[in-house]
Amino acid sequence: MMHFGRPTGRAALAPAAIAIVLCFAATAPAAREANMTVLILNDSFPARPADPDPQYLAQLVGRAGRRAELVSTDDLIRRGDWNPAQTPVLVIPYGAMFPGVLKDPLLRYVKAGGDLVIIGGYAFSDILERKEGRWQVDPSLGPKLRINTRWGKPFDVLIVDRENQLGMFDAGFQLEQVRRVTANPAALLAGGAAYARDVAAEGFAATGVLGDNVVYPEVHARHLPLLMAYDRFGRYRGPAGALILNHDGPFRNSRWAVFGVDNANLFPSGDEAAAGLFIGVLDALERPYLHTLGTQYKLYQPGETVELAVRVAPGNEGSRFEKAPIRVEFAVEGHGGPVNATIGEDGVAAARVPAPASDEVGVRRVTATLFEGERAIDRLTAGLAVTPRLLTANGDAPPAGASAAPRLTYRNNYFELDGVPTP
């Protein structure tokens, strides 16, 4: 059985690669109608500095070749269930603020595969209630309704209802000492690569709950940073925006773009770089993506066969990606020859390559890149370790001069590695 390693989102290297044309029958999101509409919440909520203009966002949706509809809370209530086949994306440009009355239809929407774009802070933390005709934040409703995973039952860990609480952001991971926010080139968005702003951003890092528990979790989502926050020395402070891609679990096929800065508008009207980023995010919500890249084992000796595999989540039906030709390329650092690859009907792209030669021992990077035509639209990296061959195929001692395994001993209450006490 193939065991998949946890994916990462780093940039790729450029060794020889294996090209694979994907033809699979993976479980796809519900079919979406040709005349789809992006819903944008537009209501008289209390104004906050991070809120973008909903009408401007609607213009950007039009520039992206999609229809936009500005809707109030009452409009959404009258709709009942929001059908992702007709309205695949809901944009919430109010950060932490959200009407408590919309909790149940929101949950039904994301469980049916609806996508979210949330801009302006820790989503679903400040729950609104209408009093005397005005929307007001009720501090008691957040812990009571528990739409996000900020609240739960304190135990060794915070116990939350993972079937009904949306796992985005972390109250303990705040953006601090930030002076610059830039686009993440590894996200491979169709637009917004030039996004860069000098801003003392505050708020919460755009993180998410990716598994079902904290001890050996079953990973059901992938986290892909979109915006990177840095301090004045250029040190990374966390993601200011990210995609949370639910490929399994209770919110399967629902994709969330979240932006946690709550003191500055990351999408000001008229900013072309920000406009490109927003349009790129809409594109990313529809495109196919990779997840669960790994190798059969984590440790290999030179010449052993490495089995590579990555899962591919298909693009949304009804989008331009539905029939687009896509392919995957694998790359293994230190591997220099072509190999054959096979693809299962379950959407797994797989390949077999020999482990790097003995002079390439150490940790080697493994990369999978997803292409639409000739354009790379997604990339994942993992790793494997190559150790010197310690025994020949007949079990004999290695040749003279071959590296020996490290020697671990215990002496004077310390473990020693090759005679050196460990810290």
Image (cartoon, helix red, strand yellow):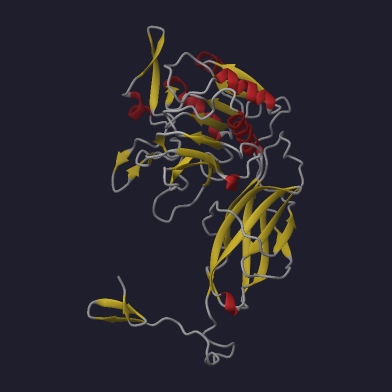
The residue at 38%/28% (across/down) is: 145
Q: Nearer the viewer, residue 109 or 273?
A: 273
* Residue 168 visible at all: no
Horizontal side of residue 55 vs 23, given as left or right: left
Q: Residue furthest front?
A: 233
Q: Nearer the viewer, residue 407 or 321?
A: 407
Question: Could you say where residue 127 lies in the image, as x and y percent from the top left?
Answer: 39, 23
Q: Is residue 390 above or below residue 45?
A: below
Question: Could you say where residue 81 lies in the image, as x and y percent from the top left?
Answer: 56, 23
How many numbered discs, if any? 0
Give the quadrant of residue 273: top right
The residue at 73%/57% (across/down) is: 20
Give the quadrant of residue 46: top left
* Residue 397 visible at all: yes
Horizontal side of residue 2 vs 415, given as left or right: right
Question: Could you say where residue 287 lies in the image, as x and y percent from the top left?
Answer: 66, 41
Q: Is residue 319 above or below residue 158?
A: above
The residue at 70%/54% (across/down) is: 328
Q: Is residue 313 above or below residue 67?
A: below
- Which quadrant of the figure contains the C terminus? bottom left
- Which quadrant of the figure contains the N terminus? bottom right
